[in-house]
Amino acid sequence: MAASSKGNEKVVYVGDSRIRKGTSPNIPADYSAFPGKSEAFIPNFLLKEWMVGVVVLVGLLVLTIAEPAPLGYPADPLNAAFIPMPDWYFLFLYQLLKYPYVSQDYLVLGTVGVPGIAFGALMLAPFLDTGKERRFYRRPIASSLMILSLIAIVYLTKVSWDFYTHELRLTNTIPEHKLREEKAREAAEKGQERPNPMKKEKPAALVDADDPATAILKKAQCITCHAADLQGQAGIPALAGVGDRLTKEEIAEIVTNGRNNMPSFKEQLSTAEIDQVATWLAKQKAVQ
């Protein structure tokens, strides 16, 4: 270290060379030594954020590979029991769109306006909040907005999921992935091949298709779910061949009290009609 010709400036030399130590006026001093001060946004802070982002991204990729998203059954507009649900990270927006001022006549506001303002604010945050203070309690506006946003997202997500589980209980519906797990477990216990919901099996022919019980099925609107030919559809079993799986008594019990996605028909059909339908369905066997 030596004094310069000006007398009031110290010159720092590196080793035996006479090269002055470089200084960058745009990079402040080590902020850790100055509480409340910050470091340069570019490149110091931004580089650290990128590194954290890379770690988070790798973690998400690992979770995605370890737990792949289950594929649902093929879309079926006739399946009235299906309850549509988005992925968990969109549940708060899904719930938000249920409120009147961001749906119906204000749908554009809910789908484009509100999310656009939220994500736009995140992108512009470094330019709108240029203060050097790092302690959150010394940045009341930014901290308050962040805390309120987190509370709103958590609240909307919980309300959406609670409503979904309530609908499942109310309609006595078992989600598709649960049905697949149960069928796969049953097949494994019996030593059978794992069922493939995408594989179409040869439909069983109806037995005594002109029986008066078919008129009762149309009256109860069973064909809405089980199809006009009673061959079923995605997620809904076929009535053709049901006699191979269930007895007459079991069929009558299901028609009377309902099961899983199927509602109860004891208010729509008389006991005699239910018995007539159960008798006819018990005859529906694939192998005669």
Image (cartoon, helix red, strand yellow):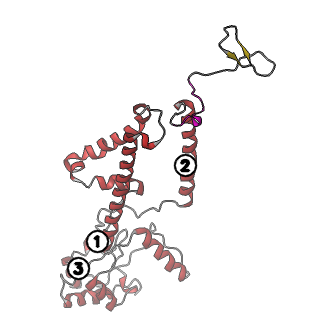
Q: Mark 2 or mark 1: which comes first in sequence?
A: 2
Q: Is residue 191 left or right of 248 when viewed as pictured?
A: right
Q: Main SS of the magenta segment?
A: loop
Nearer to us in this view, 104 or 263: 104
Do tag 3 and tag 1 residues touch (Cβ < 8 Å)? Answer: no
Q: Is residue 150 left or right of residue 98?
A: right
Rendered image quadrant of residue 252 = bottom left
Q: Amino acid at mark 3?
A: Leu
Residue 74, above or below 110: below
Tell me if I can see residue 227 in this picture.
no
- Magenta-colored span: 26-35
Residue occupying image coordinates x 57% and y 55%? 62
Q: Secondary structure at mark 1?
A: helix
Image coordinates of residue 258 in percent, x first then y, are 29, 81
Label 3 crowding class (10 Å Cα cut-off): few <14, some 14-19, many 20+? some
- Do the residues bearing badges 2 and 3 touch, measured as CB atoms within 8 Å? no
**Circle nearer the viewer, 2 or 1:** 2
Location of residue 209 with respect to 11 vertically, above or below: below
Q: Amino acid at mark 2?
A: Val
Q: Which residue is mark 1?
A: 225
Residue drawn 70% across the image and 7% down it? 5
**SS assignment at label 2:** helix
Residue 120: percent from left, percent from top: 37, 37
User: Which mark, residue 217?
Assistant: 3
| Quarter in which the N terminus is drawn | top right
Q: Nearer the viewer, mark 2 or mark 3?
A: 2
Q: Nearer the viewer, residue 259 or 133?
A: 133
Q: Residue at x 45, y 43 (%)?
A: 136
Residue occupied by mark 2: 56
Determine whether 176 is above or below 36 in the image: below
Q: Quadrant of the C terminus?
A: bottom left
